[in-house]
Amino acid sequence: MTRKLIFPVLFISIVLGSMAFVIPAHTDKGPERRMHKRHLRGDSTENHYYIIISKKDYELKVYDEEGWYATYPVVFGSRDPADKLMEGDKRTPTGHFKIILKKIHPKWGPELLLDYPNDDSFRKFSDRKAKGIIPAKAKIGNGIAIHATRPDEEWTVDNFYNWTDGCISAKYSEMKELYEYIPVGTPVTITEDGVK
């Protein structure tokens, strides 16, 4: 009887084990998109993280001193991957930022506030105004963050539904984990195509 059980148990273990290492789904794979990571360590304060967000790939990747650490599927405010021009355009800004505050939002919980607008944001905004790309009365906007969906709206991430006003949104369950180990001061690069 023991011999008969060995093969099915071994087969199930192999199948289930291989499922844990599936590559994160891309924009053409729909609801199967999952968060993936190397492994969690005990004291995250000893690790130096940085984040790269690709608007094209709908992904937030975390790196540490060993390289790639985790990937989380995310959504934005607009389907247009171009840089944010002004307040109200729903675009997510591109560029180099850092996390300046961690807080719990009353609607969507864990939130990592970015230092947008920073000096580079103001420079680009002024240049565009001077060139007439944006109206003279336009405002630059603020309050850009990486935050969760509402608990019952994780489907927005699975379905690439861009619902924010320019922020980056991860699933509620996954954002709780990201919030736990990412410290204030972490550099964040937001790109159109995922390249640093």
Image: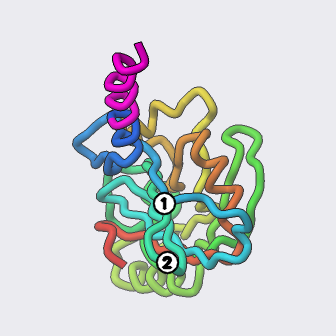
Q: Amino acid at mark 1?
A: Arg
Q: Can the viewer see residue 167?
A: yes
Q: Earlier in the sequence, mark 2 or mark 1?
A: 1
Badge 1 crowding class, 10 Å Cα cut-off, few under 14, some 14 to 19, many 20 or more, is few
| Label placed on residue 180 | none
Which residue position holds label 2?
66
Query: Do the residues bearing badges 2 and 1 touch, measured as CB atoms within 8 Å?
Result: yes
| Vertical side of 14 occupied by 85: above or below | below
| Vertical side of 44 occupied by 88: above or below | above
Res 184 → quadrant: bottom right
Color theme of the render: rainbow
Image quarter of the C terminus:
bottom left
Res 133 → quadrant: bottom left
The residue shown at (44%, 82%) is 124
Question: x, y (%) of residue 119?
Answer: 57, 86
Q: Nearer the viewer, residue 130 or 180?
A: 180
The magenta-colored residue range is 1-14
Q: Amino acid at mark 2?
A: Glu
Under circle 1, the secondary element is: loop
Which residue position holds label 1?
38
